[in-house]
Amino acid sequence: MNSRELILGRLRAAIGPTTTTPAEVPRDYRPAGGDVDLDVLVHRLTDYRATVHRCSDAEVAKVVDEVLGGQRVVVPPRVPGHWLPATVAAVTDENLTAEQIAAFDGVVTAAAVAIAETGTVVLDAAPDQGRRVITLLPDVHICVLRTDQVVAGAPDAIARLDPNRPLTWISGPSATSDIELNRVEGVHGPRRLHVVIVPRP
């Protein structure tokens, strides 16, 4: 008997006989279906240093103009055209390279769902949200969110999302800290996040 077999034998003896059926995991500790509080979402987002705008769907273009007017933006294939003012040079992502995407000043997308409790916006690469890469490389991300897409907690969001889609979970602008715990923004994504909340259509 070698050392490996000796150690494994002792571990098996200490653990005891194994069962073939895994233990039942309780799933009722945090049910979905909580009350949605938009003010909580706004508070969380602003606490994470995102900028929140509340307006009508028809006023989204005005917000985009205020944030990115006179600049170049990349957009997913199905972003609503009325969100884009004439003051921005919008280019649709049709398999642009990473270098091309990084050269844009910002990106405008929709969202799949948002979690009020955590201040998290989730994208699922739908045609109005586009590929993950277009939301990571530009310096500014403007994300338009409908009020009916806001849920109370993570269980509610997971119930709405398709786990087979590429999900991007965003909680504020990209941020990390160095060894002295100084906040550094823009390392892994946009330095500026603007969330535009519009009423349910």
Image (cartoon, rainbow, N blue to C red):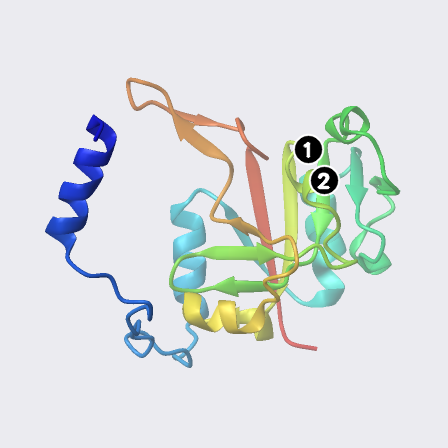
Numbered label tally: 2
- Marker disc for residue 128: none
Q: What kind of element bears circle 1?
A: loop
Q: Residue at x 24, y 30 (%)?
A: 4
Q: Residue at x 79, y 58 (%)?
A: 127
Is residue 50 found left or right of 48 in the rendered image?
right
What's under tag 1, amino acid-wise?
Pro
Q: Nearer the viewer, residue 131 or 2?
A: 2
Which circle, 2 or 1, is nearer the viewer?
A: 2
Please tell me whether residue 133 is drawn above or below residue 79 in the rendered image: above
Q: Residue at x 33, y 22 (%)?
A: 182
Is residue 198 found left or right of 9 in the rendered image?
right
Name the residue carrying label 2. Answer: 134
Q: Tell me the quarter of the image containing the N terminus.
A: top left
Mark 2–mark 1 contact, CB under 8 Å? yes
Q: Position of residue 148 (x, y in %)?
A: 59, 75
Is residue 195 found left or right of 175 in the rendered image?
right
Q: Position of residue 160 (x, y in %)?
A: 57, 72
Name the residue carrying label 1. Answer: 138
Is residue 44 found left or right of 108 in the rendered image?
left
